[in-house]
């Protein structure tokens, strides 16, 4: 929102300056501004550096990992351009309009990054035919939604047996503030990463770990829980009654590939109770110490309410649907009724 407000303010400033000052006749100012974009778009960093003063000052707004002030062309290449191309391999700047006013040029742009586009305003000061300063007002809120963060890069690793992919896939089953600091258990039961917060993330898919790893994070059915949550997960996977000291929660932000809502261990829809198969999207689960405390909750997964899975059993727990819960089974969504 801050960047958007800044963008509106800069746009109004351009209009005000243009109204108060005569349009410059110095075509070399505009030509120098255009040359900076032309060389950048062409990917020629040597030519681009030649359009910048040796002490050019670039200012990047808050909201980006590379926010701050950079002095000199090489500092900009290292500190701004390099992370941009890592975060958005498809990054492209489309110039919409140049508006010169004296030695200052206001450049309306369209930023294409991560498959999305957003409007931006850049402000360049040209002195002696080179960029003396440059400020950008990109929409960080929009752009960072699609940024190729370290976790996203790891999830793009085609080797799904690798520790990198498994750690990213399993730990992202919980919010970052939990998953990023959790212990991660691999598909063969090995510890891939020691955690520091008492939480553990692992695949909860009871099927054998595939030779090439799980197809994707949803297929892995990862879950994250604390020590009591791990007790419940281990008991469920072993077919024994959970013995908990207290209620606990388990996160499954990648959902699961489907199960019978009334029977533990049913792995195919064909074998499930008619009308009780549910392939879940993101959800949070409450595992009670005493399953009988859930008897007043219903077991209908089509309402959008929290509901009981495995009602009346030792494994009864409360399913709490989150956004996109019905992504994999839209016909069960209350919106489809």
Image (cartoon, helix red, strand yellow):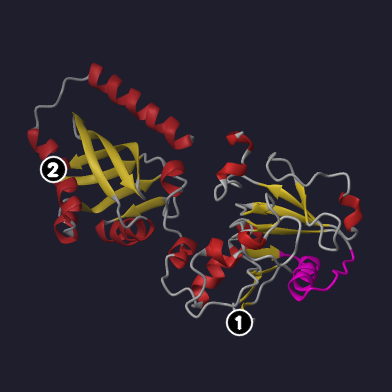
Q: Is residue 117 left or right of residue 36?
A: right
Q: Residue 89, located in which quarter of the rendered image?
A: bottom left
Q: Residue at x 57, y 67 (%)?
A: 220
What segment carries the magenta color? 225-245
At label 2, counting other C-alpha atoms closer than 10 Å, the crowd grade (few under 14, some 14-19, many 20 or more) is many
Left or right? Give the position of 164 relative to 179.
left
Residue 95 position (above or below residue 286) = above
The residue singled out by tag 1 in the image is 188
* Callout 1 crowding tier (Cα within 10 Å): few <14, some 14–19, many ≥20: few
Q: Dot 2 lies on which element? A: helix
Q: Position of residue 233 (x, y in %)?
A: 75, 69
Front in this rendered view, residue 118 or 173: 173
Pointer 2 residue:
32
- Which one is nearer the viewer's eye here, 112 or 81? 112
Distance in Å between CA atoms under marks 2 and 1? 59 Å
Q: Between disc 2 and disc 1, whose residue precedes?
A: 2
Q: Residue at x 41, y 46 (%)?
A: 143
Q: Is residue 242 magenta?
A: yes
Q: Residue at x 38, y 32 (%)?
A: 7
Element type at mark 1: loop
112 vs 272, nearest the viewer: 272
């Amino acid at each position: 929102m801050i960047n958007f407000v800044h963008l509106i303010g800069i746009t109004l400033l351009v209009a005000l300056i243009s109204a108060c000052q005569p349009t410059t006749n110095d075509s070399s100012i505009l030509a120098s501004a255009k040359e900076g974009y032309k060389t950048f778009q062409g990917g020629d960093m040597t030519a681009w550096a030649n359009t910048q003063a040796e002490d050019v000052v670039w200012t990047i707004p808050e909201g980006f990992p590379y926010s701050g002030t950079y002095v000199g062309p090489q500092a900009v290449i290292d500190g701004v351009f390099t992370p941009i191309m890592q975060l958005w391999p498809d990054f492209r700047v489309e110039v919409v309009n140049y508006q010169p006013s004296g030695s200052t040029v206001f450049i309306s742009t369209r930023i294409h990054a991560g498959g999305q586009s957003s409007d931006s305003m850049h402000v360049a000061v040209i002195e002696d035919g080179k960029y003396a300063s440059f400020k950008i007002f990109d929409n960080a809120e929009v752009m960072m939604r699609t940024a190729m963060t370290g976790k996203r890069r790891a999830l793009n690793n085609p080797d799904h047996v690798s520790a990198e992919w498994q750690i990213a896939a399993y730990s992202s089953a919980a919010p970052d503030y939990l998953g990023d600091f959790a212990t991660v258990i691999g598909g063969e039961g090995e510890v891939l990463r020691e955690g520091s917060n008492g939480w553990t993330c692992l695949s909860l898919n009871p099927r054998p770990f595939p030779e090439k790893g799980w197809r994707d994070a949803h297929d892995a059915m990862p879950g994250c829980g604390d020590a009591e949550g791990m007790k419940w997960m281990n008991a469920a996977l072993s077919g024994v009654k959970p013995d908990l000291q207290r209620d606990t929660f388990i996160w499954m932000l990648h959902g699961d590939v489907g199960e019978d809502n009334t029977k533990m261990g049913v792995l195919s829809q064909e074998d499930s109770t008619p009308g009780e198969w549910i392939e879940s999207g993101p959800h949070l689960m409450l595992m009670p110490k005493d399953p009988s405390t859930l008897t007043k909750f219903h077991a209908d997964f089509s309402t959008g309410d929290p509901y009981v899975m495995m009602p009346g059993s030792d494994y009864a727990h409360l399913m709490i649907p989150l956004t996109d819960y019905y992504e994999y089974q839209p016909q069960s969504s209350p919106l489809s009724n």
